[in-house]
Amino acid sequence: MSLTVYMRKKDIPDGVGIINNNDVYFESIKDLLNVDDTVLHMLDSIDQSVYRGGTNILTRYGEILDMTYSSTGCKTAINIGNSNGKIVNCIEAGNNAVKEILKLKDGTILLELAPYIPDDFEIDCKLIDGNKELKITSARKLSEILQHIGGR
Amino acid sequence: MAKFISDSIYFNTGRFEFDFKLNGDVTLILGDSSSGKTLFFNKLRAMEVGSSLGKYRFLNGYNNTDEVKALCKMYKDQIIVLDNADILIDLELRNLIHSDENNQYVIMGRYVNMYPVERNCIAFIREFNRRFELRYLSR
């Protein structure tokens, strides 16, 4: 398995759903969310929050809040593994969230803006460029492609 | 040009302090996920619930683009705080903001080229001990 990355909306096949509003979508899956290691990792690495059971998290400010108050980038990252076949638009994910997303080994995303990758890391990604599929193993390489030929 | 109504937003919730200087009629706030953009939106909105001044209006991804356009046209002398802007903005809304002579805008987004904003009005949020400020790309 690998992470499938579309860099242009027009490359997405007709009939395939796109999750554009990740906050709203997250609300629809939150109550039945399987809080696995990936979810725990995203909460920790993006928001520095800790899962506290049910739909609660302990934020880095020491508040117990509903997961609704996670950042949009964190919710975007969590949605990818729970997208029910839809493609997750990462337009609202900040650079820190995109870096965590690119480390995923599975899922399908739309990534139109190039992330800033000062320190390269290994990824396992299938980039869709029109009719072509490119296997990408370097986060910085992916960013360079997006800067030069992809995205909006 | 939008309308430059206020050069700052300051409020203190008791746990969080926001001291934002605004350089122009449209301010674009960028930043990593969890840097405080939506926290600012939610806390300011909560502070405004009991206020009779009605200085701010809050729009986000729970509104759709057409709603946002209609409300921006309706509002007068407001500071419109727009979260989730990247999924709401289209060319028509961009032009509406650019030509709105009645309202000031504070926009949270990432897609810099889409917004009608001068470079000295593009900022990141910086936090130190729960005190949040804006750091601009240029002065």
Image (tube, coloured by chain):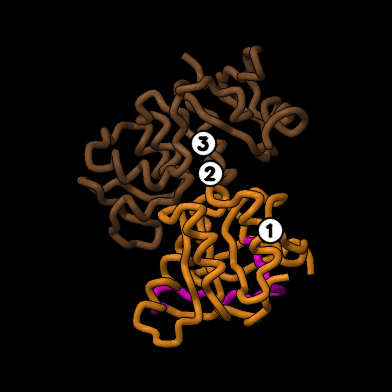
According to the picture, the residue beneath numbered tag 2 turns out to be: A93
Q: Chain of mark 3?
A: A
Judge whether A123 appears above or below A58 on screen. Answer: above
Crowding at mark 2 (Cα within 10 Å: few <14, some 14-19, many 20+): many
Question: Residue B126 location in percent, x, y?
Answer: 59, 64
B84 vs B93, left or right, is: left
Q: Secondary structure at mark 3?
A: strand
Chain that is orange in the image: B
Number of dots carrying numbers: 3
Closest to the camera, between mark 2 and mark 1, is 1
Displayed quadrant of residue B122: bottom right
Q: Secondary structure at mark 1?
A: helix
Q: Which quadrant, please, contains the N terminus of chain B?
A: bottom right
According to the picture, the residue beneath numbered tag 3 turns out to be: A89
| Amino acid at the residue labelled 3 | Asn
Q: Chain of mark 2?
A: A
Residue located at (59% from left, 33% from top): A111
| Amino acid at the residue labelled 2 | Ala
> What colour is chain A?
brown
| Amino acid at the residue labelled 1 | Asn
Q: Is residue B21 magenta?
A: yes
Residue located at (40% from left, 87% from top): B52
Q: Nearer the viewer, residue B18 or B26?
A: B26
